[in-house]
Image (spheres, rainbow, N blue to C red):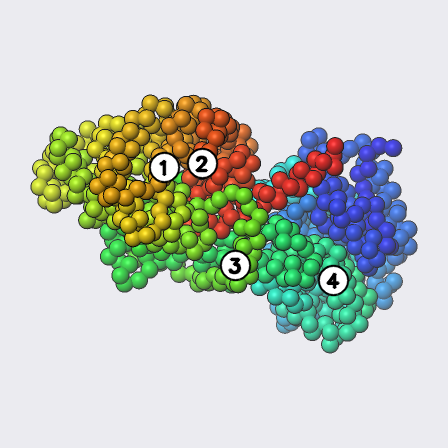
Amino acid sequence: MGKKYVYFFGKGKADGNGKMKDLLGGKGAGLAEMSRSGVPVPPGFTITTEVCNYFYENKKKLPKDFKAQFDQSIKKLEGAMKKKFGSTEDPLLVSVRSGAKFSMPGMMDTILNLGLNDKAVEGLAAKTGNTRFAWDAYRRFIQMYGNVVMGIEKNVFEHILEAKKESKGVKNDTDLDTDDLKQIVDKYKAAYKEKTGEDFPQDPYVQLCGARDAVFKSWMNDRAIHYRKMNKIPDDLGTGVNVQAMVFGNMGSDSGTGVGFTRNPSTGDKMFYGEYLTNAQGEDVVAGVRTPKPINELEKEMPGVYNQLRGITSRLEKHYKDVQDFEFTIEKNNLYMLQTRNGKRTAQAAIKIATQMVKENLISKEEALMRLQPEQIDQLLHPVIDTNEKLNVIAKGLPASPGAAVGQAVFTADEAVEKAKNGPVLLVRTETCPDDIHGMEVAKGILTARGGMTSHAAVVARGMGTPCVAGCEAIKVNETAKKFEVKGKTYNEGDWVTIDGSTGNVIDGKVKTIEPEISGEFGVFMKWADAIRRLGVRANADIPRDAKKALEFGAQGIGLCRTEHMFFAEERLPFMQQMILAENEQERRKALDKLFPFQKEDFKGLLKEMKGYGVTIRTLDPPLHEFLPKTREEAQELSNKIGIPADKIWAKSHELHEFNPMLGHRGCRLGITYPELTEMQAKAIIAAACELAKEGIKVIPEIMIPLVGSVAELKDQKAVVVKIADETMKEYGVKVKYMVGTMIEVPRGAVTADEIAREAEFFSFGTNDLTQMGFGFSRDDAGKFIKIYVDKKIMKADPFQTLDQDGIGQLVKIAVEKGKKARKDIKLGICGEHGGDPDSVKFCHRVGLNYVSCSPFRVPIARLAAAQAVIEGKRAKKKNGKAK
């Protein structure tokens, strides 16, 4: 016998089972499992996902052995129902539904009542003694087939139906009589012919083949492709097709249809949740044609059916050990289950349900931790848009930092600070740069026209927990004129705009948002994660406020403190600029002496806040021109403040300008050129540690030298740090333990990690730069083509969001192995944005890093991902053991 392409189910038996989701899809596997367990399920058959994949691999043809199995299954269904498919007297009618492994909104809509034609509708009317029901079923079928299979817009049919109701002066479909429905059918068929150029098909077999192929075609529709990309679902899974005998909820007041959940999918409360309609078919509930009733009212209307439904769904929840999302139909007081699947739920509900089910001994703690996607935790930490709001989405950018923000548009950082005193502002920029930091700090949200997921705006916004939409190229920003344009409309300073940093949507006007609630169950859930994970989780934080937030979210130290952000503060920037403009070392030291007390207090605040956890402080990284004026006007303003001629300032700005600053005079190269810079920072760190140690506060400063590509560079800078540390500790009369390490972010640094490890006590992988240099992509410009690369499947994902494990990941792996070989106790971490990406966190666990570091608001996400990495490792080991 050849390959099996069609699996039958019903009447207490099934060819498949609930574990066959890959082959039968979620819906098909659910129907097979329910049939096997004696649940009343209308019989039918599932065409496998393999047929869908064959269909696409063979120019939309079907396998050679398929037709015989398909025809045989129709015969088997006829036998089970004691009706004939294609009969005009007592026709067997079927529904056709799609069903992929994962529930996917946007896949093909259901087709009901397939098998009806001009003659069969009369036979159905005679057989049931209900003429109105038969013609209602026929008009629904024409509408669904026309829309779903032939692509005729729904409103073509809706317009005909509404016009008839209006002419009769009635509100509901149920108020139309048989003659009305017959007239509607005639008009539907005329509209079908006008739109397709052919008559509505009268042969039920032709109808069934058309519906089957439409399911396969829907696998590659734009909505389905977009949904899969968003949820990282592979394109090659394919969809199953479920053909099932019809049961009718529209046969009168003793019939109905509904959908429900075994627990509340919004809050997680343990309650029977759902809605239903009497005398209706399935799509009426979903489409909102009539207002459904809460499911508990069914207990009054049909108590027997209600109790049976409660019993079956409770049994299904215990069987699947998860919340069930179910569909049912009641035909003349007989209950039929049409679907059960694990229900989609909010993050809040997922945590509540998982913790409840552990208490109920339904699932283990490990299983509970696998019930939530780490990214979903974002929903618990940021405001979200009220789902009841109607949105006017004007543009879409990159979802750079989650949460919803509403504010009045402002176009400069200074305006943001000024206007924020009177109400919420949204900072709109072509792109942000480090000297926008004061405006970014006060803005409720940030919107940029350029830049990617690791652009300045994105990285800083995530660190602050501020919603951000970046790289929104549809908007044209004019900062000078204080306006942006999109789709022919102009938004001026002061106009209200909403952004959703979780989706990338930019929305016109003020939209209502909802503040998240963090429940006690969340704390319990995260404790379970912490007990299982091996990987430490730190935070990227530059100021005590962020450090405090990181601790609240469970961080175990700071993995990256970017010292350059400290220099942009209003009272410090002039000193930094004086240092850059100085003509000799003596003048530079003079300016650095003024910066020293600020730096010392910064580090003191951070070290104190972290209560004995490690704090990794990176010495100055960005090129110096970033601190100087960008225009002549700004040069004049600075001249007025610091007394250096504007022409001299402007000339220096030009002199320091670089064609490719990301590969230019930055990182350790600055410290090697100007050792006094490293000296001042090292002294500030060690002095802060000494002062706290004298107060009896435990501190662990870790001094990190950035952009090291050779051991000689690190040796040079380490010698400066050690010399200054010894002098400073002697001066304070106190010894503090400190470490010197480096960022591995230059590919050469990764491949010579064994040499570097002889000098470095720790490595922290700066995967933003490592990705940039490894690919040869500029991270701020790559947004222009990376989307195209992902769409064309040249790349699986944006490598600045999810670590490229096959390429950049291998550089990390090489560095880990070489580093450990040279120094057994070397501490290994990651501080690029990938430290908060769940897939990347799991990779870090597998290659043996000690910790990941990410923005404070992503700390809980990393904690859960690290726990899941342990559980997945155990499961893989178990699976491989069984395979052997």
Residue 68 on image: x %, y %: 85, 37
536 relative position to 294: left or right: left
Work out whether 695 lies above or below 238. below
644 relative position to 355: left or right: left
Tags 4 and 1 touching, CB below 8 Å? no
Pick whichever of labels 1 and 3 is earlier in the sequence: 3
In this figure, which residue is indicated by the disc labeled 1? 739
**What's under tag 1, amino acid-wise?**
Met
Image quadrant for the N terminus? top right
* Camera-side mark, 3 or 4: 3
**What's under tag 3, amino acid-wise?**
Gly
* Residue 576 sits in quarter: top left
Near-viewer residue (826 or 838): 826
In this figure, which residue is indicated by the disc labeled 2? 827
In this figure, which residue is indicated by the disc labeled 4? 313
**What's under tag 4, amino acid-wise?**
Thr
Tags 1 and 2 touching, CB below 8 Å? yes
* Camera-side mark, 3 or 2: 2
Element class at badge 3: helix
* Residue 456 sits in quarter: top left
Real-space Cα separation, disc 3 to disc 4, in angstroms: 30 Å
Element class at badge 4: helix
Residue 781 on image: x %, y %: 38, 34
Pick whichever of labels 4 and 2 is earlier in the sequence: 4
Near-viewer residue (525 or 607): 607
Q: Which residue is at a point 67% across and 67% down the rendered structure image?
A: 272
